[in-house]
Amino acid sequence: MTITLSAKEVASKIEENFPGSVVESSRDNLVVRGDSLLDVARFLKDTEGLDFDFLNFITAVDYYDHFEVVYLLSSLEHNHCLTVKTRCHDRENPAVPSVISLWQGADFQEREIYDLFGIKFEGHPNMKRIFLWEGFEGYPLRKDFI
Amino acid sequence: MALRTEPFVLNMGPVHPSTHGVFRMRATLDGEVVVDIEPVFGYLHRGIEKLAEQRTYTGTIPLTDRLDYISSMSNNFAYCLAVEKLAGIKVPERAEYIRVIMAELQRIASLLIAVGSFLNDCGAYFTPFLYMFRERERIVDLFEMVSGQRLTYNYMRVGGVSQDLPKEFMPALHKFMNLMPRFLDEYDRLLMQNEILIARAKGVGILTREQAINSSASGPVLRASGVKWDIRKADPYSVYDRFDFDIPAQESGDCYDRYRQRVEEMRQSLRIIQQAMEQLPPGPVRTEVPHLIRPPAGEAYARIECPKGELGFYLVSDNSIAPYRCHIRPPSLLNLTALRDMVRGWKVADLIIIFGSIDITVGEIDR
Amino acid sequence: MATAELDIYHLVKLQAVPPDWPGGFWWHWLFFTVVIIGFVLTMVMGVIYIERRGMGRMQSRLGPNRTGPFGLLQPVADAIKVLLKENIVPTAADKLVHWLAPVVAFAPALMLFAVIPFQNGALLADLNIGILYVVAISSVSTMGIFMAGWGSSNKYSLLGAMRNVAAVVSYEIPLVLAIVGVVLISGSLSLNQMVVAQDIPFILLQPLGFLLFFAAGCAEINRSPFDLMEADSEIVAGFHTEYSGMKFAMFYLVEYAEAVAISAVITTLFLGGWRGPLLPPWLWFVVKVLLVFFAMVWTRTTLPRIRIDQLMAFAWKFLFPMALLNLFITALQVLADWPAELAWAMIIVNIAVMAIIILIWSKFFFRLGGGRIEV
Amino acid sequence: MKFERYGIGIAKGLTVTIRHLLRHPTVNQYPEQRLNISRRFRGNELVWNQEKCTGCGTCAKTCPQGAIEIVTSTDMTENKYVVEKYEVDTGYCINCGLCVESCPYEALYFSHAFECARYRRGELVQGKEDMLETPERKVSGYFYPDKAAKLPKQTLLVEKITEKR
C-alpha cells in the first residue's frame, strides 16, 4: 500500500538542512519557497531514507492571487509518495526553477505548464510552447483567459 | 578522405502511416542514421482540462472517454476514483467487481491494438493487425452489450456504474474467456519466435532501468526495463487486493521485451477476469449520489494502472458543481520523454519500431 | 552427368516447335511479341487478383468480391481507376527524369520474357546465351527505379531509391552464382535446353541453389521480407511516393511484371518449365508460375521486413558464401560423372549437403551487425 | 539474421497464415448481411414522449454539449408546462446518454437506429415532430430494461463459430 508521507516530519527534516525554505506544512501539503525548491528537491531525491527517484507529475493551479505548482514525488523501493508545492505570486512573469536536472520526466510537463499557464522554468533547455503554436498570445488555462 | 555528408531534416509529419495518429517528428537524418529527433505535439489539443472546468462532475465523464480513446473504460475508471476520493463516496461491492472486469477487458483490447500496430510497423503486412482486431471485436461486442457504444463507453459513474450487466453478458464472457487463451498461443506461434522479428527488435531501442525511472516512464515500458512496479500491486485501488496475479517484467528493455511484456500482461488480465467472474456478488450497482455533486473543497489525486501506464486525475474542488482544476497525468506523453535518447544512432526503420513499441495515443498526449 | 552425354543432334530432334514456326521470321516475331505482351498483361491481372484475394483470405477477411464474379474484374477496376486519376508532377521535380522513369523501369520487365520458353522451342528468341540475357536485362530496371527516386525530389523516395540500388547490386551476385550452378548441370545457357535437360527437376538436384535464387530474386524485386524499397510503414511508399495516375499504374505494373518474370525464370530453371504429365505444356508453365507467385504472396503476408543493413549483411555474409559453396559442390558432382541410374542418391546427397551448410553457416559464421552507430 | 533456430520460427508463422486459408472469414457483407446491434445501443437520435414530458428542462441542463434546446410556454395545464419548442442538434450531441438518465419523468429515450447520416448540416437538428416514437424509429433499451427486452438479441462474434483453433 503506498504510504503518503506526512508532510510534517518531512518538513522538519527539510528545515534542518535548509532553514526557512518551508513556507507552510499542514498535514497533507508541504509548501516550499520558490528559490530553494531545487535544493529541497535534490535533498529529497538523494537522501537515504527518502530517495524519491520517480516524479509522478507536475501540474499548476491558478488561484487568482497566486499560481501553485504541484509536484508529486514517489519512491519505487520504499513505495511512499509526497506532494510538494511551491507558490509564485507574480502574475506578469511567474518563474520557478526547473527540476529537469534531477528528473528527466519533467521535460514535457514543464513545457506544458509554460504553454498553458505562462510559468517560466529557469534552467529548462528548451523552454518553448508544446501544444500551441509559437504565435499564440495568452495562456489558456489561466482563470482570466476566456 | 572522409566523405562529407551533411544531415538533412526529414519531416515525419502529422500524416504518416505509422505515427499512430496526428503526431509529428522532425528527424534529422545522416543518410539512414537518425542523428536527432524532435517530437512536435498539439495537433489534437482540444483543451480538455479547460473544458472540464466548465462542466459538472458528471458532465466531465464523457470528456474522459475522448482522452485515450483506445481505452476509454480505464479513463472513466480513473476519473470516477478521483471524484469518489474527493467526495468520500463508498462504491457497492458489485460495482467494484464490474469495474475490475471492465478495466481488465479494456486492458486486453488496448494491448491487442498496441501489439498489432507494433508488428505492423515491423513490416508484417497488416496480418497481425487484422488478427488482433478480430479478437478486439469480441471484447468490443461485450462493451456494446453493456454500455451501448463501441468506442466511447461513458459507462462508469461517480459512485458505481451506470447500469447493471444484462442477463446474456455472463455466458458471452464465459465463451470469450475460453477462446482467448488459445488465441494468444496461436499468436505466439505466428510471430513470437520469428527470426526476422527477433533480428529486427532484439537489442533495438534499449531503455535502461535508471533511464526509465528517471524519465517517469510507466506501464509496460517501465516493466519491460526490469522495474517490477504496477499500481494494482503497489497501491491497490478498488478491489484489486482480492485477486492473485503476478506482475511480469523483462530484463533488457528493448523493443522485443516490450512486445513480450504486453503479451504476458494480457495473460495476467485473463487470470484477473477469471477470478473476478467467480467472486461477482449480487446487489446494487450504484450508490445514491446527487446528480450535481458538490464535493467539499480540497484536492485529491487518484491513479490507476491503465494499459499505457499510470493514468492519474488530480482534482481540485472549491465546493462548486464543477471541478476547479482537473489535471490528467498522461502516461503516453511521459513515456515519450526518453524517445530521443532511445532513438539516436539507430536507423529510420528502427525509429519507427521504437516509436511503435512505446505505444502512444495522441488523444492522451495532446489532451 | 547423364545429361552431358546428350549430343546436340539428339537435342534438335526433341524440339517440337521448329525455330521459325508460323511461316517466316517476321511472322514468328509478330506472333510471339503479341503472345508475350498478352501473356504478361493477363498474368499481371491474374497475379494481382491472386495476391489481393489470397492475402485477404489469409488475414481472415474476404478480399475483393464485388467487381465481377468472385471479384475477378478487380484488377481491371484498379487499372481504370488509376488511369483516370490526375497526373500530379511535383513542382521541384526534374520533369524529364520523373516522366521517363516508369518507362525505363517497365521495358526490361517486358523484355525479360523474350527468352522464356512457353513450350518446347516456343519462345521469341532461342538465344543460346539466354540466361545471361536475363541477368543483364533484369538489372536495367534498377536504373528506372533510381530515376524515379531521384526525379521526384522527395526525401522519402530518395531513401527508397538508395535502398533499392544498394539491395539490387548486392543481390545480383548470389543470383548469378545460383544460376551458374544450374548451368553446370544443364550444360547449356539456353533456357530451352535447360528445360529439355530437366528429366529430374533441378530443384531436387540443386535445393540450395533454389533457395538462394528464390531469396535473391525476392530481394531483387523487393517482395516479401525484403520489401524495403517501398516499405510503407517507414518511408511512406518509397520511390513511387510522388507518382499518381498513369505513371503510378506503370510502376504498379512493373512490380507485378517483375514478380511474374522472376517466377517464370524460377519455373524454367528449377521446376522444369513446361514439362509435366497430363496437361498441355504451356498450361503446366502457367500453373507453376502461379504456384511460385503464391509462395511470394504467402511470405509477404506473414514475414516482417528486415532492416537495410541486415539486408546487406544477409546478402554478403550469408547468401554469397553459400552460393560459392553450392557452386563448388555442384562442380565436384559434375566432374565425378554420376551415373544416371543413381540419380535419386544424388538428390538425397544434395539435400543433406544443403541442410549441413545452412546449419553450420548460420550457427557459427553468420553474425549480424549491432545496428547502432555512435552519433 | 541469426538463424539459431534455423528458420523454424518463420515456418511456424507460415503455417498459421496458411491455415487461415481454410477457415471461414470473420467479416460479413454489411448491406446484405446485417448484424443486430446491442439492445442498449445509444443511436444518434433521441425519441421524445410528448405526454410524459413536463418541460422541466433537466435534460437541457445536464447535456454537457448544450445540444438540447427547450422553450416552454408559461401557462401550466394540469401542472405541466406546454412545450412549444424542443430541438436536439444531433450535430453537437456526443451520444453520452446523460440526458436520458437524468430525465425524471422517463420521457426521453435513445433511438435504436444507427443509419442516421444526413447530407445537410441543417437536417441534423431534430425538431419536436420528428422525435416521436414511430415504427421505424424504435426506442433503444438504454437505461430502460423493459424496453430492451422487446428488442432483438445482439449478434455476438463470440457466438459465431468462425474458426476452430
Image (cartoon, rainbow, N blue to C red):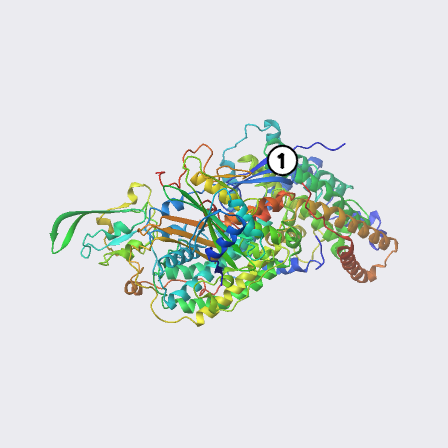
User: Which quadrant of the view contains residue B252?
Assistant: bottom right
Q: How many marks?
A: 1
In the rendered structure, the answer to whether residue C138 lies left or right of residue C60 reads right
- From this view, report whether residue C40 is shown above or below residue B108: above
Q: Which residue is mark 1?
A: C158
Relative vertical location of residue B40 with respect to residue D115 in this rendering, above or below: above
- Secondary element type, mark 1: helix
Quarter of the picture containing the N terminus of chain B is top right
Residue type, numbered disc 1? Leu
- Considering depth in this image, is B165 or C286 the residue closer to the camera? B165
Q: Please tell me which residue lies in front, D127 or B104.
A: B104
Regarding residue C194, the answer to whether it shows in the image is yes
- Inspect this view and state whether residue D21 appears: no
Q: Where in the figure is residue C241, as x and y percent of width and height?
A: 57, 37
**Residue B126, position as x, y percentages in the image:** 55, 51
Is C309 on the left or on the right of A128, as rendered?
right
Quick one: which residue is furthest to the right in this view? C336
Q: Position of residue C293 (x, y in %)?
A: 63, 51
Say left or right for C363 vs A93: right
Q: Is residue C348 above or below residue C87?
A: below
Viewer-proximal residue among A105 and C105: A105
Residue B28, image quadrant: top right
Q: Give the percent coordinates (x, y) of residue A30.
A: 45, 51
- Which chain is home to disc 1? C
Crowdedness near tag 1: few (<14), some (14–19) or many (≥20) residues, C-alpha within 10 Å: many
